[in-house]
Amino acid sequence: MSTWVRKALDFVNQTGNLNKDKPASNIWMSNLQLVRQTTEADIILLLDFEDEETAKVKFSLPGSFNDFILTPTPIQQLIRRNGSKILYWDEIPALGYQLMKDILKGISSLVLIPLNSMSTESVLLIGWESGQDFNSDFKDCIETIKIRLKETKEQTRQLTYFQKIAIRYSAILHHIPHALVFVNSDGFTGWVNDEAAALLRLASPGDQLPAILSDAMTQLRDRAINREEIYKKAIRLFSYMETVTNWEWQMEDRNLLVSCIPIDMQQLSGRLWIFEERNK
């Protein structure tokens, strides 16, 4: 196995597990650091073509060129003339005055990798100050890097989209004026909003262990004046997986109208509890 084949395999292995807890920008920076490590390049630039007049350096290694603004036309024309193929240069052609003068000064060998997708148009530039041997094994390695980076691009796009949705709906759910409790049927996860955390006397809203939620809800039922009635109905509820609404829990200082809704979806199942406070 040649050195470049081994490096390509190492790159795929190290970028294979997307850390969903990291922001997309951190994931990209980690992957570009691996590109630099794999290729032993002197400079790495990821350009995003934001519009017809603006190309921005999204990430750079070294980082001194981050957010540098360029005119995209010369690079875009070059990519289109070559059918969006990877371009290898022992001698760098004219790529735009700013790019050559301010960023690629001193670079003698360059690889240009188009990373276009449905949502964005990008290009990765990998440069070396000394000459680089673009043999077949090296080119196979670069092709592998391109495939993996395009996969990462799509994964981070989806991750960013779902993170935004999660933030949006979490903000909405936390501001609903009813206590919401969700207990996942997997036995390992649960969630409460701000109102539910206060009602159940939990330290904080958000993710909770089902065991903690079960104990807190038992304590809430035990504080009810009509707890015997509540327990009898609860037995039927859990035996038949029924949907229950307008279930009254009478407390000393207030009444709660409780709904319990079974959730059974392809990727989510459990019970949603809704506690609506009614003054006596």
Image (cartoon, helix red, strand yellow):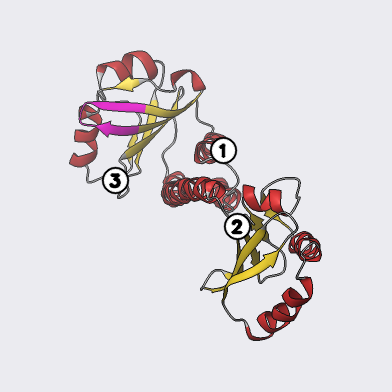
Question: Of discs 2 and 3, which sits in the foreground?
Answer: 2
Label 3 belongs to which residue? Answer: 85
Which circle marks residue 30 in the picture?
Answer: 1
Residue 2 visible here? no
In the image, is residue 52 part of the stretch drawn in magenta?
yes
> What's the residue type where badge 2 is placed?
Arg
Query: Which region shows up in magenta?
Result: 48-56
> What's the residue type where badge 3 is placed?
Lys
Question: Of discs 1 and 3, which sits in the foreground?
Answer: 1
Q: Earlier in the sequence, mark 1 or mark 3?
A: 1
The answer to whether mark 1 and mark 2 are in CB contact below 8 A is no
Q: Earlier in the sequence, mark 2 or mark 3?
A: 3
Find numbered disc 3 in the image and state the secondary structure of the residue it sits on.
loop
Real-space Cα separation, disc 1 to disc 3, in angstroms: 24 Å
> How busy is the neighbourhood of tag 2: few (under 14 within 10 Å), some, or many (20 plus)?
few
Find numbered disc 1 in the image and state the secondary structure of the residue it sits on.
helix
* Residue at 41% from the left image edge and 39% from the top image edge: 134
